[in-house]
Image: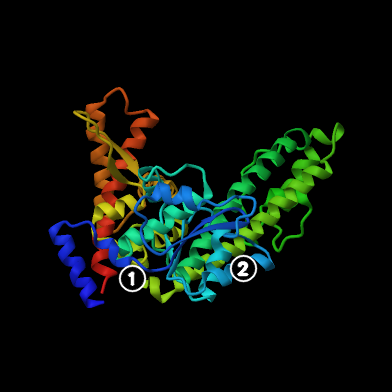
């Protein structure tokens, strides 16, 4: 192993590109995950002509013995197939689809290596393999692993344990919020004719997790009387009951909203305990407090940035959070476009609106960020005097402020959260 590492250093220093041959004679399995199946391809070495290798060994889809389905027979066949493999390579697209395949491989002591979709796409194109072909994708995954076997940074890294739990709760809450928004909107539209006086009243969940308005419409018992008399009185004075009553379907929608609110309440409480009370996150939370990050923002930051050792520069840190720049130049034209997580960008944008827009930052670094926000606002207002009231101008000011904040955040996390 030491000899292999030594040779790797020599190759890197001299610019040789044949180092991946050291990974030959390993059994690497590429697995392209579908909705209820996985299509596999195994490689023991790098083929001389990959396109020809694919054409020669391509299997008929109808009777492919390396396509395994999520049932008892498929599980048994898959276990027999992957036993003794050096790794199973998959893309992290549709994490729920790949979950059971990952668990089966772990039980069989077969390591998992995750490969990003862009890497698979570019390698497949460079080898002139067909697009939208499961077997070609599986072959590309296996080839990528062999070529980059000793290069850990070439593979995606997913944290297990508490970070995995936090990530699942966070995504479930996001999904629940999107689902509930549709139910709330439909219920309010129905109430516009059945109870117009209350249809668009803002009604947030109380201490028991239920919204006063929707709990009243659903006729749900509550642990507090807050809001009950208000809607009794409004309905008694409403003009609608003379012409129409609140329908069963409207009450069904309101019940659905209440159920979603209760689930949101339970999951938020659990997420809060994991984020705020876990010893592993203590130093992160101490730093996050300086920036007044709320629960969802700091949860996103932990998912994307824990552990901090994965980042070797502030540029990589910003790219991970949706505020990086990637060059896309051609000839004399130089262009850059944003890269990174859109979900992270949204969370940070909401933080900027709430914390900076309402001047809630009080720490030393927080006041520095606040001053920077005012500076950017004044600077851009002078450069674009006719644009200072437009949404595009406001978004630009916030984006520049968030980018500055991330530089400060990376500095503070490096100081406080690394051994």
Q: Nearer the viewer, residue 322 or 94?
A: 94
Circle 2 is placed at which residue position? 77
Does label 2 or label 1 sit earlier along the sequence? Answer: 2
Residue at 40%, 64% in the rendered image: 44
Q: Position of residue 201 (x, y in %)?
A: 64, 41
Which quadrant is the N terminus positioned in?
bottom left
Marks 2/1: CA distance?
46 Å
The picture quadrant where one finds residue 63 is: bottom right
Q: Nearer the viewer, residue 403 or 224?
A: 403
Residue at 78%, 41% in the rendered image: 235
Which of discs 2 and 1 lies nearer the camera? The answer is 2
Asked if 184 appears above or below 59 in the picture, the reply is above
Circle 1 is placed at which residue position? 283
Residue at 78%, 47% in the rendered image: 251
Q: Nearer the viewer, residue 66 or 191?
A: 66
Asked if 276 appears above or below 210 in the picture, the reply is below
Residue at 84%, 38% in the rendered image: 245
């Amino acid at each position: 192993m030491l000899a292999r590492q030594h040779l790797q250093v020599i190759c890197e220093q001299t610019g040789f590109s044949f180092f991946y041959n050291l990974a030959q004679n390993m059994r690497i399995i590429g697995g392209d995950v579908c909705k209820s199946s996985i299509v596999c391809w195994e490689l023991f070495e790098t083929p001389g002509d990959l396109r020809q290798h694919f054409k020669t060994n391509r299997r008929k889809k109808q009777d492919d013995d390396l396509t395994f389905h999520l049932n008892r027979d498929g599980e048994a066949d898959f276990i027999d197939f992957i036993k003794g493999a050096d790794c199973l390579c998959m893309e992290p697209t549709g994490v729920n689809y790949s979950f059971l395949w990952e668990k089966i491989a772990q039980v069989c002591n077969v390591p998992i290596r995750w490969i990003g979709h862009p890497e698979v796409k570019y390698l497949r194109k460079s080898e002139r393999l067909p697009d939208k072909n499961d077997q070609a994708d599986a072959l590309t995954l296996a080839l990528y692993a062999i070529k980059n076997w000793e290069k850990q940074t070439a593979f995606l890294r997913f944290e297990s344990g508490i970070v995995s739990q936090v990530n699942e709760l966070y995504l479930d809450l996001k999904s629940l919020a999107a689902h509930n928004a549709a139910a709330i909107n439909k219920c309010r539209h129905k109430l516009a004719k059945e109870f117009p006086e209350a249809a668009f009243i803002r009604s947030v969940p109380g201490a028991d997790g239920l919204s006063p308005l929707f709990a009243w419409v659903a006729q749900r018992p509550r642990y507090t009387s807050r809001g009950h008399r208000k809607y009794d009185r409004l309905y008694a004075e409403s003009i609608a009951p003379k012409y129409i009553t609140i329908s069963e379907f409207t009450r069904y929608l309101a019940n659905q909203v209440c159920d979603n609110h209760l689930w949101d309440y339970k999951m938020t409480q659990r997420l809060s305990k994991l984020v705020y009370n876990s010893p592993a996150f203590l130093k992160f939370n101490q730093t996050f407090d300086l920036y007044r990050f709320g629960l969802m923002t700091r949860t996103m930051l932990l998912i994307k940035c824990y552990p901090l050792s994965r980042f070797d520069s502030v540029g990589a840190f910003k790219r991970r959070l949706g505020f990086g720049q990637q060059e896309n130049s051609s000839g004399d034209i130089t262009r850059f476009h944003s890269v990174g997580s859109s979900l992270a960008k949204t969370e940070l944008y909401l933080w900027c609106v709430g914390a900076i827009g309402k001047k809630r930052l009080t720490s030393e670094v927080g006041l520095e960020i606040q001053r920077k926000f005012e500076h950017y606002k004044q600077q851009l207002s002078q450069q674009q005097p006719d644009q200072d009231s437009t949404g595009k101008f406001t978004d630009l000011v916030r984006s520049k402020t968030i980018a500055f904040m991330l530089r400060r955040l990376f500095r503070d996390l490096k100081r406080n959260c690394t051994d």
